[in-house]
Amino acid sequence: MDLIDNRILVTGGAGLIGSHLAASLTSDNEVVVVDDLSKGTRDRVPDGVEFARADLTDKGDVARIVTEDVDVVFHLAAYTDTNYEKPRQLFEENSEMTYNLLERMNDVGVEHFAFTSSSTVYGEAPRPTPEDYAPLEPISIYGASKLTDEALLSTYAHSYGMTAWCFRFANIVGPKQRGNVIPDFIEKLLENPETLEILGDGRQEKSYLHVTECVDAICHVVEQATDDLNTYNLGTRTTTAVNRIADIVADEMDLDPEYTYTGGDRGWTGDVPKMRLSIEKLAALGWEPRHSSDEAVRRATRELVAELRAEEST
Ligand SMILES: NC(=O)c1ccc[n+]([C@@H]2O[C@H](COP(=O)([O-])OP(=O)(O)OC[C@H]3O[C@@H](n4cnc5c(N)ncnc54)[C@H](O)[C@@H]3O)[C@@H](O)[C@H]2O)c1
């Protein structure tokens, strides 16, 4: 569909990816950011964009924001902490939000839905992993919740006349991100510049994409892909090991810390230690990342070091 002159809801628009997406869509569309501010912050909602505070697990809130004049919903809101302590809450909230939105959209005739899934639906799969890889065997509750959401998406696309886009993201990095490997390393080094504790053995290797490129790819796919259900991996062709991220962070902070390791081949229960998505389907649709995974990590590191140093000095 053309992303021009639409009324667009961006759920999770006070978060990392949603705030960038809302900013990019606002020049040609009327954009409403919907967020409960449980993790996102109001200051991230771009200027000129309407903001609706709503909890998407609440059907009343969903009915208030999803009205028949909406053309497309970009659903990015989710419980996103990877080291979560409340797995049941994560699973229930993520699946409930998606179901509430789809059900309400169907009730009032909103026909376009873009959803942000994750590489975690593949579990520990051979690499590079294409979209038609099977069986999908996630190894985390987060991955299980995304696969559940995808099943709902498929149902509404195939049986209820909705057009849906489903994005399986690699790791997305960028400014104001928290609770991810890069800000974690920076925060640890600001506290103690001498040593850096690395979760696992440091050899975990994943693909990182900068948030600006992620948003560019999302819009490209929504504009170009026309099936009922359009599932696309979004990532880079290259990967970055955790040890390499530590080197980049230390280099950008001008430090030379000693690394210590918590051990084992992964950071936490449910962590997929090696991930690289095939992006051939995306390339066939005419989109290529401009930066490698290492370049995305370095750019995000620069942005986050400046930000976290400024925060520390106030
Ligand atoms: N960042 C990544 O590396 C990555 C990778 C794979 C998939 N994703 C997916 O992309 C989407 C966006 O990720 P992000 O990194 O911007 O996350 P984020 O945590 O920065 O943003 C998510 C937003 O959702 C909001 N939210 C949570 N529960 C809500 C509720 N009940 N009602 C309304 N709003 C609620 C939060 O306040 C937050 O602003 C998520 O669905 C995430 O699962 C992200």
Image (cartoon, rainbow, N blue to C red):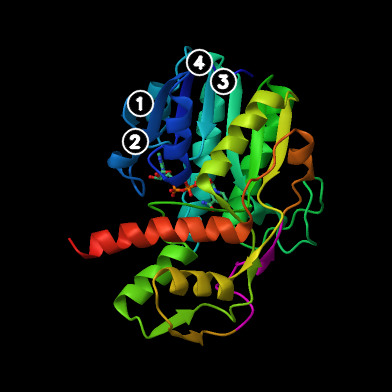
Circle 4 — which element? loop
- Residue 153 appears at what percent x and percent y? 65, 34
CB contact under 8 Å: marks 2 and 1: yes
Distance of label 3 from label 2 (alpha carbons): 19 Å
Sequence-earlier tag: 3 or 2: 3
72 vs 257: above or below: above
State whether residue 108 appears in this view: yes
Confirm or reject: label 1 Cβ below 8 Å from ligand 1. no
The crowd level at tag 4 (other Cα within 10 Å; few <14, some 14-19, many 20+) is some
Residue nearest the observer in this picture, 75 or 293: 293
Q: Is residue 226 left or right of residue 44?
A: right
The crowd level at tag 3 (other Cα within 10 Å; few <14, some 14-19, many 20+) is some
Magenta stretch: helix, strand or loop mostly: loop
Sequence-earlier tag: 4 or 2: 4
CB contact under 8 Å: marks 4 and 2: no
- Residue 40 appears at what percent x and percent y? 36, 46
Sequence-earlier tag: 3 or 1: 3
Which amino acid is tagged 1? Val
Determine which of the numbered discs, if any, sits on residue 45 in the image. Answer: 2
Q: In this picture, which residue range is highlighted in magenta? A: 264-276
- Residue 170 appears at what percent x and percent y? 62, 53
Residue nearest the observer in this picture, 312 or 268: 312
Residue nearest the observer in this picture, 286 or 134: 286
